[in-house]
Image (cartoon, rainbow, N blue to C red):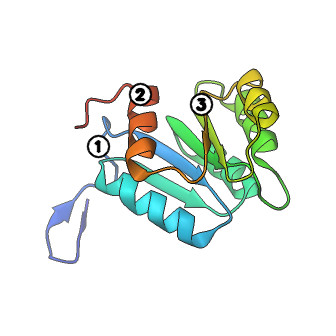
Amino acid sequence: MEQNERGEQQWLFPDLLQKCILLVDDDFSVRTLYSRFLNKEGYLVTAVKNGYQGIEALGKHHFDLALVDMAMPGMNGIEVLENIRRRRPEVAVVIYTAYGSPEIAGEAIEKGAADYLDKPFSLKELKATVKRILGDNIP
């Protein structure tokens, strides 16, 4: 246990029932928006800026879901998806992009993505997708 800023004792470990999400996006504002929103919805979010950091985090922590942007420098979303499928097949993956096409969506689903979202999408849509995939009862 440790003390928080109000001097209260708190556990260093998250609630074991709390769902953990890995968010991989090179856009700082998108990472910030989605991670803050999902945190407020009751999820524990780890946000990283590229696929390499995402794969590294995957090796160190438990995740129930990965939200992965398609268009990133270095390692694109499909490559991140393939890495996750090989290393941690139990982790559900949602690919999203502003540069979508039926071909990209089909490839993502074919390679094991649980879902595919075209940007822009609303936070309500994001919440519904996450809840559906994780089977959450969070209102």
Residue placed under numbered mark 2 in the picture: 132
For badge 3, the amino acid type reads Asp
Q: Residue furthest right?
A: 74
For badge 1, the amino acid type reads Asp
Query: For residue 105, what is the image quadrant?
Result: top right
Q: Secondary structure at mark 1?
A: loop
Q: Nearer the viewer, mark 3 or mark 1?
A: 3
On screen, residue 81 versus residue 93, left or right, reads right
Q: Is residue 14 visible?
A: yes
Gap between marks 3 and 1 measured at Cα:
26 Å
Query: For residue 6, what is the image quadrant?
Result: bottom left
On screen, residue 101 versus residue 62, left or right, reads right
What is the x, y in percent for residue 123?
A: 41, 52
Residue placed under numbered mark 3 in the picture: 115
Q: Secondary structure at mark 3?
A: strand
Gap between marks 1 and 2 measured at Cα:
21 Å
Q: Residue at x 41, y 28 (%)?
A: 132
State the residue in front, 3 or 112: 112
